[in-house]
Image: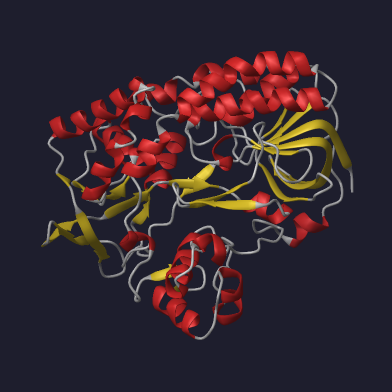
Amino acid sequence: MTIVTADLVIVGAGPAGMACALDAERAGLDVLVLDENPLPGGQIYRNVGRSPLPDAALLGDDYTDGADLVARFAQARVRYWPDTLVWQITRALEISFTRRNGTAASGQIRAKAVVIANGAYERPCPAPGWTLPGVMGVGAAQTLLKSSAALPDGPVVLAGSGPLMYLFAWQLIQADRAPAAILDTTPSRNYWRALAQLPGALRTPAYLAKGRRLLNAIRRSGVPHIRQVTRFSVEGDGRAESVQYTAKGQESRITASVVLLHQGVVPNVQLTRSIGCEHRWDEAQLCWHPRTDAWGETTVPNLFVAGDGGGIHGAIAAQTAGALTALTVSHRLGALSRESRDERAAPLRRQLDRHRAVRPFLDTLYRPADAFRRPADDTIVCRCEEVSAGEIRAMARLGCTGPNQSKSFSRCGMGPCQGRLCGLTVAELLAEAHAKPVAEVGYYRIRPPIKPVTLGDLAESHVPDLNAAQPTEFAPK
């Protein structure tokens, strides 16, 4: 197998990955960025340089503001490999990948340092009927809009809570596809609890003002915003046709051919778990993230995490974190003195603290309700293997103490998604059943390959010209 080498390998080309690459390249490092997507930008800036939309402004300023970062990344002397799946990283920083840019090619990379900047994915939102065709995550629908200008047909209902749900509702309104309703599951007690975190959030008044503008625009549009929803189920014969819900104690039904679910995002920890990094449970954000130091280094030497993969703080904070990580990697590899690193890091740390100040407020306000994290017995939890919440509770009564052990009882978490869509729910169900903290119950043991690959990918041993200097394979319009 051909071995590719680099000083620094970055996995992911979102805000954190691009910022890290730019600063590391500026320090003189040989940087290679591996991106599963066809273009740089990550989810937040997806296709910002080549938007298929007639007017990308309908996605909002947060989206179009990323054009400058993507353009600078495109002009940098950085090796950028799009359409590249990283399916294993060892503790020796050997990276196995499959590249699909016209012809499949698999190989291995040896790096002096690795930065994982693969961001986050949507928290699972298990509810009755969520496996019906026509039901998907808000983030998935937004990906279709950004990548293909695809908009849902027929009545659309958004259900859940969190800033992304409101943003996408606003984007649909801007695209003249206003949703039929927003079913808001934010518990009313969250508003009172969040007030205690408001003073810190006021350090970022622009962020709060943006949220208020979104909510005001939704209200002015006339879209029904139904609050205090405590239960909902998607119903239909072979596909989504309606949503039955309970709000303020009253049951109602609304027609819907597309139902978009959301209750926040969580760090993508599949790679860091497969490598063996230590992780900790974040009770405020109700998710796992790798243990890191102030520079983003994990418990595996020279392996770093930057951006939302290390904790949810948003795109601007991710970009700042990527720049900080680049500084310490440059110092570690001899391209930057300790004094220069610390001097340049000081203003970045102040920026990062300011950008993160709003998170305790948001985490408290949009903390998902228990009922949507630990669903009723008849709700499917593991979609791949069709395991219900009731079956998970029955396993607990039989002595199953953790998610990893649940595989022996039911194959739960052993499907193609490897627990992405069920891991958090299974952990919370077992923790509740045993009256233990989630941190004590644990999580799945993730093994490579972290995503399905073909036998051909594994057998591929020839990587043509991949170690040669190549121009960035992207240029904005």
Q: Coloured how?
A: secondary structure
Going 84% across and 26% down the picture, which residue do you hit? 333
**Taking 379 as reference, is 321 left or right?**
right
Q: Position of residue 425 (x, y in %)?
A: 45, 63
In terms of depth relative to the viewer, which is nearer, 190 or 471?
Answer: 190
Instruction: Work out whether 346 lies above or below 122.
Output: above
Going 38% across and 60% down the picture, which residue do you hit? 373
In the picture, residue 323 is in which quadrant?
A: top right
Going 57% across and 32% down the picture, which residue do you hit? 14
Q: Is residue 155 visible?
A: no
Instruction: Work out whether 302 lies above or below 337.
Output: below
Going 43% across and 74% down the picture, which residue do you hit? 433
**Taking 435 as reference, is 407 left or right?**
right
Instruction: Work out whether 352 lies above or below 169.
Output: above
Q: Position of residue 459 (x, y in %)?
A: 82, 58
Instruction: Work out whether 66 lies above or below 10.
Output: above
Q: Position of residue 389 (x, y in %)?
A: 41, 73
